[in-house]
Image: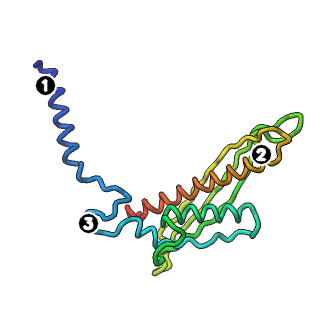
Amino acid sequence: MSWFDARIVARLVVVAALAAVTAGCFRPMYAERGPDGDSALRTKLSGVEVPPLNLPNGSREARLGVEIRNALMFNMYGAATGGPPTHQLKLRISTSRLSVLVDPTTARADLENYGINAVYELRDIATDKVVLTGTTFSRVSYDIPGQQQRFARSRALRDAEDQAAKVIADNISQRLASFFIAGT
């Protein structure tokens, strides 16, 4: 074995030793119990109350508010209801549509972007203090297959709305999980 091979073997041994030492530092986010015996993340998330969004009844935004709220509750609780509330999540959303490609002969859009912006705050119910604030957004592109297909256009928009709502709910629930694990 040459001195070059010995250096490579020595480096591999050092890397393996460091990996073995730090292997015990890993803690899965969704583990049932932490090493110090604290409660599971799912229990902490089940204490977050998500009230209905304050949006005009019968509007597209009201349907989106229900979609986002349902997706958030499913991500946090795994069901329609959680445990006794310890925190309250307030959410405000705004939507936008932008025509990206427009047919020059008919002046109808061939490709549109749909967006949702969300601002949220998490309040501790016991102290009524805001413990977390944040913003998130989602942008979804969709195309309109043919100028005369009104149903296809409407369905493409609805699918884009649903996809954007799911992304918003996932972003918020991941941020809440991070907050409850790290405390910041």
Q: Which one is closest to the eye, mark 1 or mark 2?
A: 2
Q: Which residue is drawn at 63% across and 51% down?
A: 163
* Residue 82: assigned label: none
Question: Pointer 2: residues within 10 angstroms few (<14), some, or many (20+)?
Answer: some
Whether label 3 touches label 1, CB < 8 Å: no
Q: Residue at x 24, y 49 (%)?
A: 23
Whether label 1 touches label 2, CB < 8 Å: no
- The kind of secondary structure element at disc 3 is loop
Which residue position holds label 3?
Answer: 36
Q: Residue at x 70, y 43 (%)?
A: 142
CA distance for labels 1 and 2: 67 Å
Q: In which quarter of the image is the C terminus?
A: bottom left
Picture layout, residue 4 above or below residue 70: above
Q: Which residue lies furthest to the top in this view?
A: 2
Query: Image check: 9 left or right of 27?
Result: left
Q: Which one is closest to the eye, mark 3 or mark 1?
A: 3
Which residue position holds label 1?
Answer: 6
Query: Image check: 151 left or right of 122?
Result: right
Instruction: Report x, y in % for residue 94.
Output: 68, 59
Instruction: Report x, y in % for residue 6.
Output: 13, 25
Mark yes or no: residue 130 visible: no
